[in-house]
Image (spheres, helix red, strand yellow):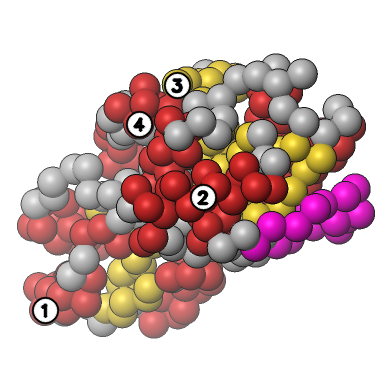
Amino acid sequence: MGSKTISVLTSGGDAPGMNAAIRSIVRAGIGQGMRVLGIRRGYNGLINGDVFEMNLRSVSDIIHRGGTILYTARSPEFRTEQGVAKAVEVCKDIGIDGVIVIGGDGSFRGARALSNAGIPCIGIPGTIDNDISCSEYTIGFDTAMNTAMEMIDRIRDTAQSHDRCSVVEVMGRRCGDIALHTGIAVGATAILVPEVKYDFDKDIIERIRFTQKIGKKHFIIIAAEGLGKINEITAEIQKRTGIESRTTILGHVQRGGSPTLRDRVVASEMGCRAVNMLYNGQGNKVIAVKNDKLIDYDISEALSFKKKFDINLYNEALKISI
């Protein structure tokens, strides 16, 4: 057996489905005769020894809850050599044989530092933005998209009542996946993402004017937060078209809420796989989704990938969003 005492932490932004992964890790670990420790508030908690033993009941009634029962926090101290050394010392003092880290690329860089210092780590991709380069899917993405879709459907009701243009900002700093998928799902007139340079006249104004000619009177523009200048975009649309325009920033509502079936299932699968990997003595790995199957990569290899944007889907969206 590779690991007798394993631990789990959540790091970076919270994502719906993290609790499902924690539950899976605790149940699978205990089922294999391991001790499972929870680390509160990410790497910060590890450095400060905020660690407690979990049992089967510790994770009852959490699979349907958003957020993370282990809490999460940024840890500037852990980015230093001294911080990593402190975390390693805590692991040795407590007797932690392996750590499962649920989070994004920043969290995985922390897991790599711990692994290189002798503490085996497994990374599980959990971020609503779907911006982890090595994985086609991340825990929380499906829930965030569905939340955004429901909110935009409601916004459409009022836009339709007033013949307005609604410019809606969704999450995604470097990654336009939420914007792309929700834009298609709500029939947005234009979808603006960080990965594709847009022409204001051609990609926004001309599309609005074209659909006006064929009888459309209300419009939805979806923009990823990474673009910035959302209020300026809205003001310019109103100025150029004369259509009353409003900005809505969905913000952190997209992070919360009960995870969807897909997020619960993927999180549960990833949790079980992470436990099995530590059980079999593997570390320094990241679990990922490729072609709808779970695979794993060496952490350094995982961090070297470049995120691919689905330009084909984006081009299809342009054809049908008129």
Question: Label 3 near label 4: C-beta < 8 Å?
Answer: no
Cα distance in 3D space between marks 2 and 4: 22 Å
Question: Label 1 near label 3: C-beta < 8 Å?
Answer: no
Foreground of the two, 78 or 234? 78
Q: Position of residue 240 (x, y in %)?
A: 9, 73
Question: Residue shown at 45%/34% (left/top)?
Answer: 117
Cα distance in 3D space between marks 4 and 3: 9 Å
Sooner in the amino-acid sequence: mark 3 or mark 2: 2
Question: Chief secondary structure of the magenta span?
Answer: loop
* Above or below for 208 versus 319: below
Q: Which residues are magenta?
A: 50-69
Cα distance in 3D space between marks 3 and 1: 52 Å
Choose mark 3 or mark 2, whichever is in front.
2
Circle 2: is it few (<14), some (14-19), or many (20+) Cα within 10 Å? many
* Above or below for 55 versus 277: below
- Check disc 3 and give the amino acid type: Asp
- Check disc 4 and give the amino acid type: Leu
Question: Residue shown at 37%/26% (left/top)?
Answer: 300
Sooner in the amino-acid sequence: mark 3 or mark 1: 1
Question: Residue shown at 36%/67% (left/top)?
Answer: 168
Residue corresponding to mark 1: 239
Sooner in the amino-acid sequence: mark 4 or mark 3: 3
Q: Position of residue 5 (x, y in %)?
A: 75, 37
Choose mark 2 or mark 4, whichever is in front.
2
Residue corresponding to mark 4: 303
Sooner in the amino-acid sequence: mark 1 or mark 4: 1
Residue corresponding to mark 3: 298
Sooner in the amino-acid sequence: mark 2 or mark 4: 2
Question: Label 2 near label 3: C-beta < 8 Å?
Answer: no
Residue corresponding to mark 2: 87
Is residue 217 at least partly visible in the picture?
no
Instruction: Kindly state the secondary structure of the residue where label 3 is placed.
Output: strand
